[in-house]
Image (cartoon, grey):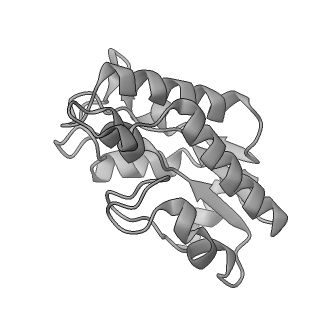
Amino acid sequence: MLNQGISGNRLLRDVAGVSALARFDRDVLVQPGVKWLMILEGINDIGLGSRAGAESSDAVTSDDLIVALKQLIDRAHIRGLKVIGGTLTPYEGAAYYSESGEQIRQAVNQWIRTDGAFDAVVDFDAVARDPDHPKQFRPGFNDGDHLHPNDAGYKAMADAVDLSVFGLKAASATNSR
């Protein structure tokens, strides 16, 4: 298992490192033995692009993100990789939260859940959100910035991955750790 995540990374534009679109070949496609890819990317594009005072060049739409995700899926499928889509977690209370950004997040998540472009989906949003305040993290799952999960949140997200997608049983995966 490789984790090529970069804190603060974006799907469409370079900010905290090279964008996911630009580094996809290097970080995924040329890696030996890769069979599956999980994509959880886009919240920084939304937040940074819809915050007050953002430059117009930072703005994104749900369509922008969906087109980029489709491009990653297509590129992976051409190489024979299966792709798991992860819904974007809630972020109300984060420094760059906005209602317009929340609408984009909801639209992207709806597409991830229903379009069928991914080979499998993990609904991280459903796992991480507070049932009483669905735009926010569940109490005890956030590290305090309202954007990143804490250890308990990451564990819940990891537990939400259906290992049968990989032909594994949960018990055998637990025993192999």
Vertical comparison of 105 with 99: above or below: below
Snapshot quadrant of residue 27 = bottom right
Snapshot quadrant of residue 7 = bottom left
Report the side of 167 relative to 113 (left or right).
right
Q: Residue at x 76, y 41 (%)?
A: 117
Q: Is residue 130 visible?
A: no
Q: Is residue 25 visible?
A: yes
Q: Residue at x 66, y 51 (%)?
A: 84
Which is more toward the observer, 45 or 154?
A: 45
Vertical comparison of 134 with 3: above or below: above
* The furthest residue to the front: 56
Vertical comparison of 70 with 167: above or below: above
Q: Residue at x 50, y 32 (%)?
A: 61
Residue 159, horizontal then vertical, whole percent: 51, 49
* The furthest residue to the top: 132
Report the side of 148 relative to 155 (left or right).
left
- Quadrant in which the N terminus is drawn: bottom right
Residue 166, horizontal then vertical, whole percent: 74, 59
Image label count: 0
Residue 18, horizontal then vertical, whole percent: 43, 68
Q: Residue at x 49, y 39 (%)?
A: 124
* The furthest residue to the bottom: 32
Snapshot quadrant of residue 14 = bottom left
